[in-house]
Amino acid sequence: MKASRTVFLVCISLFLQCLSCNIPSYLLPLKEGQDILLSERYWKPPFQNNFSSMLFKANMRYGEKFDLGGLLALKQVKKDNFRAIFMTVSGTTLFDFEFGQQGLVIHQLLRAMDRKTLLKIIEQDFYMLLANHLNGQKATLFNKGKQVLLKTRHKQHNLYFIQEHKQRIIRVHQDRKVSLQFSDFLDNSPRTIEIQHHNLPLNLALKRLK
Amino acid sequence: MKTYLVVFAFVGILLNPLIAQDFKRMKDPTIFQKKMQQTARTTTSLQSDFIQVKHLDVLSEDITSDGRLCFKKENNLRWEYISPIRYTIVLCAGKVSIKDEGKLSSYDLSANKTFQKISEMVVRSIQGDLVLDKVAYQYIFQENSVQYLVELLPKDEKVRSFMERIQIYFSKKNLRVQSVKMIEQSGDYTLMKFKNQIFNESISDSLFSLH
């Protein structure tokens, strides 16, 4: 009886611990980590500082409310700064944003999309995708077999980067709310990207065209 | 939100530069409009390949897509992108259907007046039928030795926020639309050039149904 109560209390305590840290459960348990500064020595962000531009087929879906196909152009404008231009297949620019150390710069935005909540979501998602701006930031490194987990913070959120072979990031989580999955790599650069929100039915799928 | 996004996706279709050479004000726009109406009246069908060029100042390379369009009177339109992605838009029987790499979605045109208006404008432009909407646009009629150029300047603030002007180029030879350019406020533009045009040949109804 005493033993089962102890097990029960341990379970409850673990459960509460999980809730408090909001870490995706499959990443648990985390053993003692190493404090580091994010740099080339420890990680390689999905889009490294070595390309001029990329074009993706994009599909943005919000439950049954909308399902929009389009094109996303990503262009590095300077070190750690990227332009992301989302347009319809027929060429209408929906948004043209710049992400970098200085924060979000809006170059162009269709008025119908000018909604605070939507902009905040897009901003957070792209900061996770284009993670270069995190270079130099404090993080904790956990070794997990063949993978490395890097935990850092950005704007009150915990970010978890899962990197394999110490070379390429395969997943990113923002607490338990958003996850990014990278696959189909070419020269360590992902050709397929999926951004999934878990607290709202929003999904962005990207497939690299060139 | 959904409706707006579909509307804006569709607006892009209207978009297009030929390198404009020495265009001057058209001497008599009324005669030009009458000729256009006559051409539109005699057009029962149209098939054409197209090349779409999206120019963004920030990119060193333009984004080029190509595809094919089919139009059959009264209001049947199939706009099909073949490369770099497969994407088809069909307007038929008051509905717009979109097939995006195998995934099909449909919208009722009557549910949204703006969308309905835009679809009418697309269909008319393809036929060359230039019905002037002076409430929505200011029109500038120009010409050079080989082309007519009609520029549409949006009056509505909402439209102006994403589109500075639309330029439609017509051949003087056959009064057919050769290209359309939509210029955004930033100076970026989408150019659509039409080639291999075939007029008034029979087109199967099955082309205007997506499964």
Image (cartoon, helix red, strand yellow):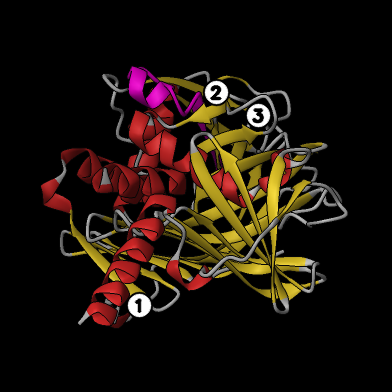
The image quadrant that residue A163 belongs to is: bottom right
Compared across the picture, whether B188 is left or right of A156 comes to right
Q: Which residues are magenta?
A: B154-173
Residue A108 makes an appearance in the image: yes
Q: How many numbered marks appear?
A: 3
Q: CA distance from mark 1 to mark 2?
A: 38 Å
Residue B39 makes an appearance in the image: no
Q: Which label was assigned to residue B144?
A: 3
Quadrant containing the N terminus of chain B in the rendered view? top left
Rendered residue at 24%/74% (across/down): A5
Q: Amino acid at mark 2?
A: Gln
Q: Please, which residue is most extreme toward the left here?
A: B110
Nearest to N terminus: mark 1 or mark 2? 2
- Foreground pick, A107 / B86: A107
Q: Which chain's residue wears label 3?
A: B
Nearest to N terminus: mark 3 or mark 2? 3
Tag 1 secondary structure: loop
Give above or below for B77 relative to A111. Answer: below
Q: Where is residue B195 shown, x and y percent of the image?
A: 60, 60
Q: Amino acid at mark 1?
A: Ile
Q: Which chain's residue wears label 2?
A: B
Q: Which residue is mark 2?
A: B185
Q: Which label was assigned to residue B203?
A: 1
